[in-house]
Amino acid sequence: MSEEAKKIIKKKKRKKIFIITIQFLIVITFFISWEILANKKIINPFIFSSPSRIYDTLLKLIITNELWEHIFTTLYETIIAFTIGISCGFIIAIILYECPTLAKIVDPFLTMINSLPKVALGPIIIIWAGANTKSIIVMALLINLIVSIMNIYNGFTGVDKTKIKLLKSFGATKKQILRYLIIPESKRTIISSLKINISMTLIGVIMGEFLVSKKGIGYLIIYGTQVFNLTLVMSGILVLVLLSFIIYEIVTLIEKKLSNQR
């Protein structure tokens, strides 16, 4: 490796360390400011709570093993809904791409379903699927499935038409074009849809837990609201933020690995 290349790598590492340090300082400053404002009664500690109270609450939940149970429940529901959503979205997008007439027929319906507030369907979902995990997964699927279909399908239709004509001129079948051109060319779109899908799935799961769950982070938040324990609510929100960050980083890592594959 040349000296110039080493300098570029060092510069990138320094910049990354600088960014991470600034981010860390912002988070620390936020929590310290929050604690001071709550202790000085500048903000209402009952409504806004404080980092020290949240720490005590989370510590109690960890000691009683309740926190891990809630986290595991939300993670389990998210993984199930995410796997089903991305798999079905990919298959349906292929079907729509292969059948342009069908795609035109269902396009306005997909748009309408996507714009529909899913919470409004909550009571119907509970009646259909029951007040259990199934309802939560269905709620998450209603949110993530349509988005997956539309993103992946748009990726397929955005492939260079000249390349398709070229393969057709060599006698390639529809199946071969899809396998060797459309899907590989849409890899970036498919990977980016994973990020959107996991975010939408987590939102759907939390919404479902608000409605029917007796476990999970969503339940923890809604229960804290019902008993006016806003520290518990803030604790649940903080855990949810950390969980969503970890999941996002995992998906980003998968994205980098898939992007590096040829």
Image (cartoon, rainbow, N blue to C red):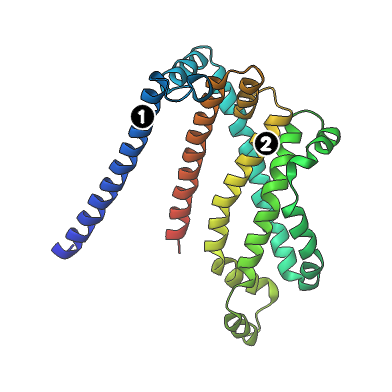
The percent coordinates of residue 232 (x first, y second) are 55, 20
Element at label 1: helix
Residue that sits furthest to the front in the current view: 42
Q: Nearer the viewer, residue 220 or 181?
A: 220
Residue picked out by circle 1? 33
**Residue 10 located left or right of residue 188:** left
Q: Residue at x 56, y 21 (%)?
A: 230
What amino acid type should be assigned to the residue bearing mark 1?
Ser
Is residue 240 placed above or below 194 in the rendered structure? above
Q: Nearer the viewer, residue 38 or 10?
A: 38
Q: Residue at x 73, y 70 (%)?
A: 98
Are there few (<14), some (14-19), or many (20+) residues within 10 Å of tag 2?
A: many
Element at label 2: helix
Q: Which disc is residue 207 wearing?
A: 2
Residue that sits furthest to the left in the current view: 3
Q: Which disc is residue 142 wearing?
A: none
The reply to whether residue 2 is in sight is no
The percent coordinates of residue 255 (x first, y second) are 48, 53
Is residue 183 placed above or below 202 in the rendered structure? below
Are there few (<14), some (14-19), or many (20+) residues within 10 Å of tag 1?
A: some
**Residue 51 located left or right of residue 232:** left
